Amino acid sequence: MKNEIEKIIKIGQVLSKQRTKETDEFDGMIRLGKQLEDQKNSGFDLWTRLPSYQDACKHHGDYASSHMPCISDILCEATLFISHGLAPTEEQIREAGEMYTCPCGGELHDHEADEAEAG
């Protein structure tokens, strides 16, 4: 009987350690998810200050956020924007190519309205 109790205690200890390991892994995944969400929120905050966001708002209005680029693209645009002194010239904008334009690629834009607004 004493041996059986010791076996049960040992099994309980093993299971407890296993559960702790699984809980730690689960907690780690939750922390990772929170970190990714924080990065996405910070990226969005940065993007709202960049030319491509302004272009997205121009073409998509309240739905501009659905065209948010990936964090690495936001950081590349922010770097270029800062290097242009936060106020790029027309020449710098042309040289930047698609970097300062809406991330959707323009397929969803009303180009006739753009031409009428420019003309």
Image (tube, grey):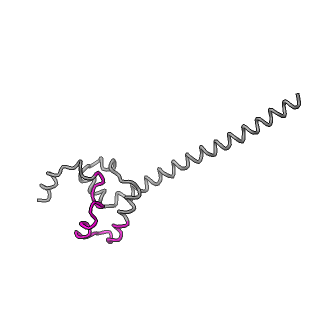
Name the residue: 26% across, 49% down: 61
Q: Is residue 92 magenta?
A: yes
Left of 103 or right of it: where is 75? Answer: right
Left of 25 or right of it: where is 113? Answer: left
Left of 54 or right of it: where is 26? Answer: right
Name the residue: 30% across, 50% down: 64
The quarter in which the N terminus is drawn is: top right
Q: Is residue 52 positioned above or below 11 on the image?
A: below
Left of 23 or right of it: where is 13? Answer: right
Q: Position of residue 40 (x, y in %)?
A: 43, 52
Query: What is the chief secondary structure element of the magenta stretch?
Result: helix
Q: Is residue 99 positioned above or below 109 on the image?
A: below
The magenta-colored residue range is 79-104
Q: Position of residue 24 (x, y in %)?
A: 63, 46
Q: Residue furthest top?
A: 1
Q: In this figure, what is the number of numbered marks?
A: 0
